[in-house]
Image (cartoon, rainbow, N blue to C red):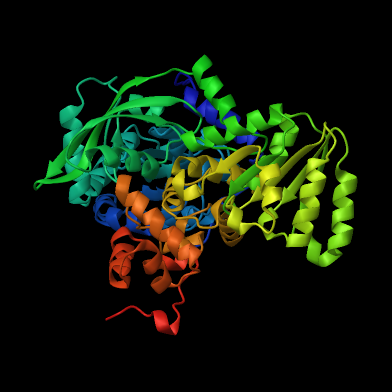
Amino acid sequence: MAPATQTPGYIEASRRRSVLYGIDPANSEPPYRGALTPAATALRELSGPVLDRLVAQIMDSTIGVVLADRSGQVTHRDAGNRSTLAAMDERCIDVGFSLAETDVGTNGVGTSLETRRPAVVVGEDHFLEALKSFTCANAPIFHPISRRVEGTVGVICPAEETSPLLLPTATQLSAQITRLLLERAAPEERFLLEQFLQHRRRSNDAIATMSARVLIATPAAQRLLAGVVQAELWDHVSGVVGQGSGGSINFVRSDGRPLRLRCRPVRRAGEVDGAVVEFVSASRPGTRSRQQRRNSRLDGLVGASEQWRGVVHDARQVARSREPALIVGERGTGRLAIAEAVAKLAGCADIRVFNSADTLSVGALDWISRFRDALAPESTVILRRIDHLIPEVAAALAAMVGEAPDRTRIIATTESATTGDFADATLLDRLNVLRIDVPPLRNRRDDIPPIVRHLAARLGRYSVDPGVMAVLYRQPWPGNVTEVRQTLRAAVARAGTEDLEIRHLPLRVRRMRNRKPLHGLRQQEADAIIDAIATTEGNKKDAARLLGISRATLYRRIDSYGIGLDALGFSRVPENDRRPR
């Protein structure tokens, strides 16, 4: 009698996870997930020659082969004889069905993906009763450059024919597919991999090579970059190496942790084609990081940029005072949310909001009367869009603000704090005692990733695909945070129960996915162009006049900087404003 073999630890851990997933081992079967994704199809086509050679070698045997994508969905399967293929069919081991551990529990495909290591699951070790007649050996397929898991490949046979050769066969298949991935890698990827191998000296070095599309990092660097959006990081790094020289920069993660990076350009054919990034120092989570996180938070609001920390600092000052305050910023920047956060920060439970637009619907006299009644001690009154008030209402409010009870806090929001934009300059003077200026989102791009994660979580999406984040990071966002919220809401609705992908984003957003990253004066000029187009409501002739340049120059700048007019909401050009030919 053969001695009992000990169950591997990864099998025991997988079975515990399977129980937590709530899978019924007696009645469950692999679910059908529908058509393959483009990435899964590409993996199947790439792996075809490798798998075909194996099938030719195992012809007339009871061995089968299974390829799955990174989600665990089967993309290809075959076998040495019809009986094995029929047995696989009967148990839904077929193209389109999911063998992810979350769907069917412990099995070769799902467990190798979950652990990111080769896995052998013998007969009774399977969680589903239906799979216990098989033995499966699988090895994950890693992209040779990014080290991202692309899928898993393995062999399968009847449990009573289990062989020690199954696992070596699976790992050999994985290695062959990995070599094909390297051969098909773009020249840029291979070049950066060579640079990475040249500069990596020790296994514990925190070093990476990167470009706009590629990021190759050591494990130590990967840990430091956890949660960092590649497009955001590259925008900072390329600003240093773009002119052909290197330098050091400070980079703050979305959780407030600062990183110090030394950046050196790498050249191919004489042109800067990427950068070597060395992590010189990184403060460990401690008092400073926690303080930074506290200083970048308001109730229900998030940010990571220096500009946002300035907003929070000013908001805290307003909360400590009872003087009138003005919050200035473009539509959609969150002026009302900041005003409400200030009131909560001050411990005020009585918050009353008055919108200037309501003077038309309820009547000016009734609206003024309600405002007068709201000026009670210990209350906070928020006046929205005061730059839209008509002269009679503005004059009445100016008088009431001057006579408000001592313990009443008045906060007003406006798009402009220029006297000429107000019907009554006295009202502006009396409200503009303390002030919070909220920069537009395009001028504080470091806030985009935390804002996207925060809003996505409120929509039930607790992780955002890096590709999606990269596209969102490059948008001009003329509608600011409000537009980000609307974009995510539309994308989540379109995705339904699927993972959120780039294809779910609105068309106007996808059209901007290749916008070039800009820095310094070029970014300032691009921002000035966007502001001018917004100010003139899309009229290019007036925008050019406002900028002091010709219309032809304006169009060249728009093309050069990759500014998408569709994304700005100004795709329609008036008849008298067509592009000169």
Q: Quadrant of residue 392?
A: bottom right
- Asked if residue 81 shows in the view, the reply is no
Could you tell whether 323 is left or right of 293 in the image?
right
* Residue at the extreme bottom of the image, as rendered: 575
Looking at the rendered image, the quarter that the C terminus falls into is bottom left
- Residue in the foreground of this view, choosing between 335 and 22: 335
* Residue at the extreme left of the image, as rendered: 269
What's the residue at 58%, 30% (across, down)?
313
Q: Position of residue 29 (x, y in %)?
A: 59, 50
Q: How many marks?
A: 0
Could you tell whether 65 is left or right of 501 in the image?
left
Q: Position of residue 427 (x, y in %)?
A: 71, 49
Q: Position of residue 558 (x, y in %)?
A: 34, 64
Q: Position of residue 481 (x, y in %)?
A: 57, 50
- Residue in the foreground of this view, choosing between 466 and 427: 427
What's the residue at 87%, 60% (across, down)?
365
- Residue in the foreground of this view, choosing between 54 and 310: 310
Could you tell whether 413 is left or right of 106 in the image?
right
Q: Quadrant of residue 128?
A: top right
